[in-house]
C-alpha cells in the first residue's frame, strides 16, 4: 500500500499543475532574496574597494581591530572576504527561501488536498476546517513547545558531533507538527487525526526522511509540495479504506 501511495504521489507531483506549485515557492523567494543579497554584496565590494584605494578604513575601529584593518589593505584579503560573503550569503538566501517556501506551501495546502481528493478519493468527504483563530492559537502552542525544546537543547551544543543531531530535534518537531496540523486544519478528512495517531511510527520515519531531504537546500525547496502530496495520499487512502469498510458493514446488515 505504501508503494502505491508513493507511486500516486510521484505521478501527481510531476503533473503540470503540481510542478507549477513546486516552482512558484522556489523561484519567487530566490529572485527577491537574491536581489537583496546582490545589492548587499555590491555595497560591501564598493566599501572594500574604496578603502583599499584611499587606505581609509574608518568604518572599522582600528584601535580595537588593528590586525583586521591592516589585513584589509591587501587585495587578496578582499578576494577572500568577498568569496566568503558570497558563499555564506548564497547559503543564507537558500535557507531564507526554504522558510518562505514552507510558508507558501502551507497556504497552498487546501488547494493541494482538494486536487488530490478530486482526482483519486472523491468518496472521502472533507471535514470542517478549523477557524483562523483556533489555527493561530494551535500554531502558537506548537511554536511555544518548539522554543522550549530549543532551549533544552542549547546545553548540548558544547558536545562535539552529538550537538548537531540534538539541535535538529526541535526543528524536526516543528516540521512534523506544523505539517501534520496543516493537513488536519484544512479538513482533509474526519478520520485524519485517528489515522495520524494509529500510524505515528510510520509517519515519524517518513517525516524524518522528508526532514533530512529538506536540509539539502535546493532539494528541500522543490520537494515541499511533494511532501504534502504524499501525506495527502496517505491520509486520504486510509480514509477511503475506512469508508469502504463502513459501507460493506452496512450492506451486510
Image (spheres, grey):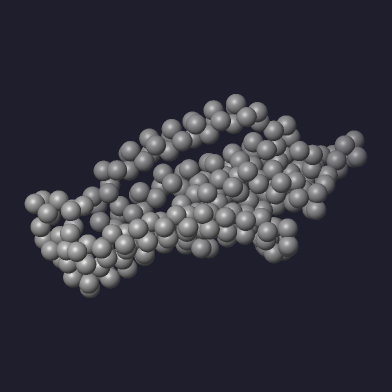
* Residue furthest front as drawn: 54
Residue drawn at point x = 57 percent, y = 55 percent: 28
Residue 125 appears at what percent x and percent y? Answer: 79, 39
Q: Name the side, left or right, on which 201 lies relative to 39.
A: right
Q: Position of residue 63 (x, y in %)?
A: 8, 51
Q: Could you tell whether 23 is left or right of 72 in the image? A: right
Viewer-proximal residue, 143 or 180?
Answer: 143
Q: Residue furthest bottom?
A: 76
Vertical relation: 238 (above or below) 210:
above
As rendered, which of 169 and 55 lies closer to the eye?
A: 55
Front in this rendered view, residue 43 or 100: 43
Q: Is residue 198 visible?
A: no
Q: Position of residue 142 (x, y in %)?
A: 49, 35
Tell me: 144 left or right of 182: left
Residue 180: x, y in percent?
59, 42
Q: Which residue is pictured at 51% across the width and 63% down the height?
A: 218
Quadrant of the image for the N terminus?
A: bottom right
> Residue 21 appears in which quarter of the rendering?
bottom right
34 sits to left or right of 224: left
Front residue of 20/187: it is 20
Amino acid at each position: 500500500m505504501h508503494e502505491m501511495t508513493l507511486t500516486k504521489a510521484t505521478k501527481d507531483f510531476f503533473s503540470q499543475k503540481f510542478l507549477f506549485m513546486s516552482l512558484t515557492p522556489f523561484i519567487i523567494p530566490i529572485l527577491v532574496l537574491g536581489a537583496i543579497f546582490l545589492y548587499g554584496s555590491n555595497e560591501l565590494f564598493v566599501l572594500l574597494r574604496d578603502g583599499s584605494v584611499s587606505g581609509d578604513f574608518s568604518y572599522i575601529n582600528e584601535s580595537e581591530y588593528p590586525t583586521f584593518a591592516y589585513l584589509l589593505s591587501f587585495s587578496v584579503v578582499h578576494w577572500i572576504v568577498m568569496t566568503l560573503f558570497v558563499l555564506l550569503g548564497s547559503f543564507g538566501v537558500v535557507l531564507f527561501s526554504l522558510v518562505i517556501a514552507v510558508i507558501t506551501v502551507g497556504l497552498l495546502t487546501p488547494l493541494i488536498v482538494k486536487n488530490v481528493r478530486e482526482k483519486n478519493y472523491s468518496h472521502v468527504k472533507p471535514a470542517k476546517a478549523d477557524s483562523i483563530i483556533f489555527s493561530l492559537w494551535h500554531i502558537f502552542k506548537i511554536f511555544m513547545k518548539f522554543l522550549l525544546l530549543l532551549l533544552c537543547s542549547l546545553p548540548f551544543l558544547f558536545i562535539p558531533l552529538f550537538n548537531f543531531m540534538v539541535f535538529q530535534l526541535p526543528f524536526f518537531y516543528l516540521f512534523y507538527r506544523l505539517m501534520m496540523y496543516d493537513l488536519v486544519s484544512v479538513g482533509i478528512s474526519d478520520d485524519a487525526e485517528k489515522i495520524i495517531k494509529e500510524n505515528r511510527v510510520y509517519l515519524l520515519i517518513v517525516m524524518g526522511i522528508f526532514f533530512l531531504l529538506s536540509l539539502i537546500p535546493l532539494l528541500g525547496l522543490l520537494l515541499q509540495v511533494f511532501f504534502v502530496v504524499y501525506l495527502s495520499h496517505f491520509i486520504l487512502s486510509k480514509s477511503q479504506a475506512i469508508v469502504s469498510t463502513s459501507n460493506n458493514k452496512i450492506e451486510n446488515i
